Image: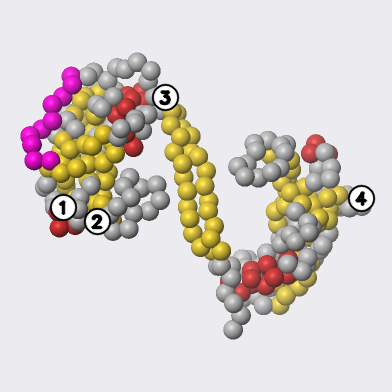
Amino acid sequence: MPEVLKAPLVVEFPFTRSLGPVQSAFLTGLREQVVLGVRTADGRTLVPPVEYDPVTAEELRDLVEVAPTGTVTTWAWNHDPRRGQPLGTPFAWVLVQLDGADTGLLHALDAPGPDAVRTGMRVRVRWARERSGAITDIACFEPYDGTAGELTGHDGRFEDMVTGIVAPARLDYVYSPGRAQAAYIASLSEQRTVGERCPSCHKVYVPPKGACPTCGVATSEQVEVGPRGTVTTYCIVNIKAKNLDIEVPYVYAHIALDGAGLALHGRIGGIPYDEVRMGLRVEPVWTEGGRYPDHYRPTGEPDADYETYKEML
């Protein structure tokens, strides 16, 4: 039985967003150890605050302080914390209704074990030592036996307001390509490109998926395509990617390899970025020991006629 291919992959990017007046005040308040909610027209206090009433869609601006203490309304035990979670040891995810609020705030509760957590237990905020204006300024909640915490009397107006945040998004997973793509990867190691032909519509798909995306039938007939191909569409990249040693601007294109029924992605090199065009004929450039083409360069052939690749745009 052939070895099953698999590899760890990471998808990661920083998500940057600006803040409106309500979220700005909430996060700035956390930096100053103040918890703010927003009051609705019918008197409810929402924490975390939102900019529009979820019931009436009315814009909300009336900020109100709530206590840093509250009651657990529901919880779940996390026995195996993951990267980037609030605590490195097992903890409980809890929904806490802070004193003075009518909604729950989701965060971590530092507890020795699930037997120490219960619905209705009293908790309080444990503030982070270093705070920057983010939800992580609340390090976690901790058990608390006292009465409601004291309010500072803050009105939600601060100096040096937090106006934006950067939230890192990351997904770690293990990818297994399956039979069809494993054969495709193996062919690339031999500097060949192999697709699979649909027995119904007869299109050759590269990379192959094991089934025709149009007809839905299984594919198994392997067909070598390329190595040359045609640029069908492209974009000019002006932002340098992390850990990618390619100077910007550069061109990333859809390339329809000769004999393929589907265009694949590839970088275009060996030509000024502003001279890349639809119909440009290209060929792969392999680096020594490379497992896939480093980029595609012009072949010097005349441009392909639009009619020959219009179905793959």
The residue drawn where x is 30% and y is 35% is 128
Please state which of the two labelled residues, at mark 3 or mark 2, is closer to the viewer: 2
Residue named by callout 3: 163
Considering the numbered disc 3 on the image, is that residue within a helix, a strand or a loop? loop
Q: Can you see residue 26?
A: no
Report the magenta residues as a range.
144-153
State the residue lying farthest toward the right: 301
Considering the numbered disc 4 on the image, is that residue within a helix, a strand or a loop? loop
The vertical placement of 196 against 49, above or below, is below
Asked which quadrant contains residue 291, the reply is bottom right
**C-alpha gap between disc 4 and disc 3:** 52 Å
- x, y percentage for residue 214? 63, 66
The residue drawn where x is 64% and y is 71% is 182
Residue named by callout 4: 300
- x, y percentage for residue 30? 29, 29
Residue named by callout 2: 77
Closer-to-camera residue (97/133): 133
Q: Residue type at mark 4?
A: Gly
